[in-house]
Image (spheres, rainbow, N blue to C red):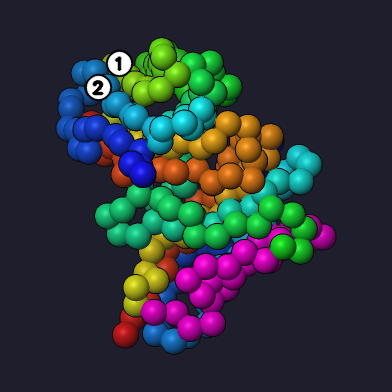
Amino acid sequence: EAGVAQSPRYKIIEKRQSVAFWCNPISGHATLYWYQQILGQGPKLLIQFQNNGVVDDSQLPKDRFSAERLKGVDSTLKIQPAKLEDSAVYLCASSLEGVDTGELFFGEGSRLTVL
Amino acid sequence: GNSVTQMEGPVTLSEEAFLTINCTYTATGYPSLFWYVQYPGEGLQLLLKATKADDKGSNKGFEATYRKETTSFHLEKGSVQVSDSAVYFCAPRGYQKVTFGTGTKLQVIP
């Protein structure tokens, strides 16, 4: 079974530039998560989708971050304009719909460095 | 909302030593409890889980028991190996919301 796919794995940009990350979840997983993991910290939820609807985006900095999951499958997270403090690993995860006993499956992450 | 307090690292142990990583949580209702592990250069993956009070999750020699009365889910292993060197995250899940602890880095030396 294919896992969660993310790209690019690494990205280096200058501040005020824009960047986009892509995620393809495990087939059949209705719930998709984007997390931000700053070095030395635990993952912080940015946005959670169920199918193509947003469940939780309370911690998404909406002035610069946006995310979409138009067809309820793959998703894109965009940052525009980037700030130095956005340097982090962006993790995508997926899980079965509405199952609190189920695990999250993570991709390998996209590491962003903002100079 | 949920919150997690996890033992700060790094933790450095000799091979075959006993490991405990403490985790306590606050949550609405009765969450499921998870430990995830992140090996160097890899993504997070599930280590073990427990879905109700007094359940014990186990995997790869690691164990954790869901203690509702103390809201804890401490991770233990009787004899660690060098290959266990990783970062460990405690993560309660309730009402479809998952909260991660700050992570505990474990380094096992031969």
Secondary element at tag 2: strand
Q: Is residue A31 above or below residue B99?
A: above
How would you rate the neighbour count of disc 1 (Cα within 10 Å): few for under 14, some for 14-19, many for 20 or more?
Answer: some
Q: Give the amino acid type for the residue marked by disc 1 in the picture.
A: Gln
Distance of label 2 from label 1 (alpha carbons): 7 Å
Residue B79 locus on image (x, y percent): 48, 83
Query: Is residue B94 a member of the stretch shown in magenta?
Result: no
Q: Is residue B74 above or below residue A16?
A: below
Residue A30 locus on image (x, y percent): 51, 27
**Whether residue A36 can be seen here:** no
Q: Is residue B57 above or below residue A69?
A: below
The residue that label 2 is drawn on is A19
Q: Which mark is residue B1?
A: none
Magenta residues span B56-81
Dot 2 and dot 1 residues touching (CB under 8 Å): yes
- Quadrant the C terminus of chain A occupies: top left
Q: Which mark is residue A80?
A: 1
**Whether residue B19 can be seen here:** yes
Residue A53 locus on image (x, y percent): 53, 16
- Give the quarter of the image for residue B67: bottom right
Q: Give the amino acid type for the residue marked by disc 2 in the picture.
A: Val
Subunit that carries the residue with mark 1 = A
